[in-house]
Amino acid sequence: MFKTIMTIVLTVVGVLFSMQNFDHVPVYFFSGKPVNIRLIFVIAICGLTGYLMRHFFGIAREERLKRQIYLLKRNNDRKLRSRSRSRVKWADEYEDDHDEDDEYYVNGE
């Protein structure tokens, strides 16, 4: 990923240098007056803005996934606890209903 980004950036800068395209370009902000900025700074600002947008959207997505994983883990823990409780109850009922003599028939003797 890093190599790809660096390749693209170096290619763009190389093309700009070879074309000598470091002219000033008018950028219109909220006011009606244009602000003359060098083209390389416009490209750098756009690249930085794109990176920051991906970064913050990635953080939001990561937090959402963490929440989902936490909820799934919590639900699974609850299910396991309820299953283990029901198994313990069933085992206790089984022991209460059967006497020592029942082992004779279970073992087949």
Image (spheres, helix red, strand yellow):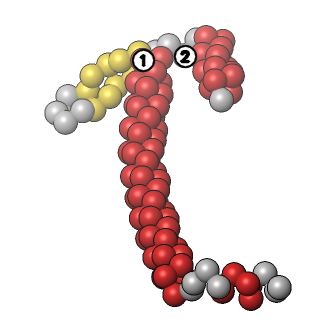
The image position of residue 90, as x and y in percent, is 51, 79
Given the image, on which type of amino acid does mark 1 rest? Phe
User: Residue at the location (61% across, 11% down)?
Assistant: 17
For the C terminus, the quadrant is bottom right
Q: Is residue 27 left or right of residue 19?
A: left
* Corner quadrant of residue 77: bottom left
For the N terminus, the quadrant is top right
Residue that label 2 marks: 21
Mark whose residue sits in front, 2 or 1 = 1
Residue that label 1 marks: 41
Above or below — where is 78 with respect to 25?
Answer: below
Pick the front one: 101 or 53: 101
The image position of residue 31, as x and y in percent, is 16, 33
Q: Residues within 10 Å of mark 2 (few under 14, many from 20)?
A: few
User: Residue at the location (43% across, 48% down)?
Assistant: 66
Which comes before the other along the chain, label 2 or label 1? 2
